[in-house]
Image (tube, helix red, strand yellow):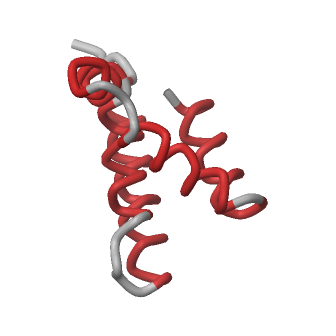
Amino acid sequence: MAMLWGAFVALAVVSPGTLDSIWIWTHGLWWPVQIAVWVLFLPWMIGLAVWQSDWSSGLRWAAVLVLAFGWTLMAFPRKK
């Protein structure tokens, strides 16, 4: 989980055009495959959707970082 979020953030910093290309590519897929991609990669697809929004750069960064931190935190097992 954390590694994929790290890759997402690295792409956002180094090559934001790659995130744009991924977004365009997923929207060009046949709709059943598109649904499968959304289900399999839900947190990152939400992150991509936020990244593609019209929000200000600071708000997009904040939303993506909160999403990444929160989703990664939820992925760690809890002690009982």
Residue 59, compared with residue 2, is above or below; it is below
> Which of the pair 62/38 is nearer the observer?
38
As displayed, is residue 35 above or below residue 19?
Answer: above
Percent across and percent down for residue 74 are 30, 31
Is residue 27 found left or right of 22 in the rendered image? left
Q: Does 53 appear above or below 3?
A: below
Question: In front here: 19 or 3?
Answer: 19
Residue at the extreme bottom of the image, as rendered: 56
Return the residue nearer the eye: 43 or 18.
18
Residue furthest to the right in view is 14
For image coordinates 48% across by 70% down, the residue present is 61
Locate residue 70, reporting x and y percent.
34, 46
Q: Position of residue 20 (x, y in %)?
A: 55, 57
Residue under the image location 34 percent in, 71 percent down: 53
**Residue 35 shown left or right of residue 66 in the figure:** left
Residue at 35%, 80% in the rendered image: 54
Image location of residue 64, percent across then percent down: 42, 59
Q: Which quadrant would residue 62 be assigned to in this image?
A: bottom left
What is the number of callouts on the image?
A: 0
Q: Quadrant of the C terminus?
A: top left
Q: Residue at x 34, y 16 (%)?
A: 77
Q: Indicate whether 68 appears above or below 59.
A: above
